[in-house]
Amino acid sequence: MTIIVTGGAGFIGSNFIFHMLSEHPDYRIVCLDKLTYAGNLSTLSPIMDNPRFRFVRLDICDREGVNALFEEEHPDMVVNFAAESHVDRSIENPSIFLETNILGTSVLMDACRKYGNVRYHQVSTDEVYGDLPLDRPDLFFTEETPIHTSSPYSSSKAGADLLVLAYHRTYGLPVTISRCSNNYGPYHFPEKLIPLMIINCLHDKPLPVYGEGLNVRDWLYVEDHCKAIDLILHKGRIGEVYNVGGHNEMRNIDIVKLILHALNKPESLITYVTDRKGHDLRYAIDPTKIHTELGWLPETRFADGIQKTIDWYLTHQDWWEPIISGEYVRYYEEMYGNR
Ligand code: NAD
Ligand code: TYD
């Protein structure tokens, strides 16, 4: 079994590759990644010499390159994690989101069609459903919830999802889609809430909370997401969408305070900054379908997962320090300088 995993030098893709190599000793993984600012080859260094692993630097929008790789590798499956993934960046510059997230998805699926109707899995997000009101805790996203996006990021992911379903219906491509809630864990790029707050805490820097910090996200430990995708690849019904989430809703401000307390830092580090444009209020997944059909349940409780994550950032400064001292410095100035 050879699986092409795109975006495997990023947060979830790298965790997925580690998971697959250890859970399936007879599988070969080919990681295809453009290495954008969010891709980090050092993450994959422990497996670079593994004979069951190959890394190829490639843009998923590069049709010739993608086709050549399919000719060489004859993959049995493709799992597409490659994406521009940060909402704030999409608000600043939407166009690269449309290119990678929509066009790139079509290039990969065209190759799947051309080289033997290859099984294709799209890693999507709960953000395609838009948001839920804060005062209706009884409401959740199901797979039937209409697509109703808020940001250029979520719109590009929704566009890709529609295309994936269209390739199934029109060409019979064997596809599945997973729509997961917010992930956290090791190798999370430090522009996202949890790693940003941990690292700023460690540097005694202000913690920029958007608006009043009352927005709610449904957090899932990354390993649980990887296990869900593994299950969908092997047991999921073709043509189906599966929501993935662990009923773990938290307000941003509560996460920030939890991190502060865990690191023994004062709440005076909290700085309320201008809200994100179009900021989604609440995400909350109903995971009944993946639970009843595939038996998936999250295994890591938030209290344990967040402690493991904080410990990981404490012991892996060698991973994140080069990131925050590079191009990221300029990004941070631009994003937070006048906020
Ligand atoms: P990430 O930003 O950490 O990693 C993205 C990876 O894709 C990077 O390695 C980057 O180099 C690569 N990439 C970007 N453009 C590419 C291109 N044109 N060609 C090839 N490679 C390219 O993202 P992540 O948080 O690991 O998210 C992975 C996937 O999961 C995304 O599709 C995202 O929409 C989805 N998702 C993320 C979350 C979350 O909480 N992070 C939740 C649900 C779904
Ligand atoms: P983020 O990690 O960017 O994920 P997403 O927008 O995809 O949910 O943000 C999580 C939440 O944290 C979101 O409501 C925005 C908020 N946030 C802050 O308050 N401050 C920050 O500096 C960042 C990056 C996010």
Image (cartoon, rainbow, N blue to C red):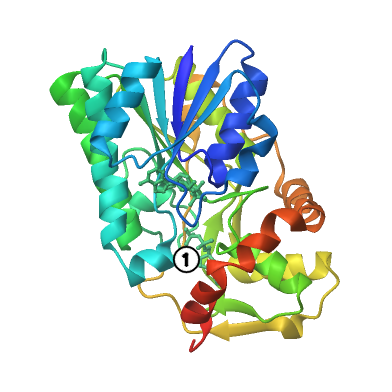
Name the spot of residue 124 as percent of width and height, x first. 39, 42
Q: Residue at x 49, y 73 (%)?
A: 331
263 vs 334, nearest the viewer: 334
Q: Residue furthest right?
A: 264
Label 1, residues with CA under 10 Å away: few <14, some 14-19, many ≥20:
few
Note whether 70 is above or below 88 in the view shown. above
Amino acid type for the residue under numbered disc 1: Leu
Q: In this image, 194 relative to 159: left or right?
A: right
Q: Residue at x 47, y 61 (%)?
A: 282
State which quadrant residue 321 falls in: bottom right
Name the spot of residue 109 as percent of width and height, x first. 26, 29
**Residue underneath mark 1:** 134
Q: Secondary structure at mark 1?
A: loop
Q: Residue at x 59, y 24 (%)?
A: 20
Q: Is mark 1 within 8 Å of ligand 2?
A: no
Q: In this image, 264 relative to 252: left or right?
A: right
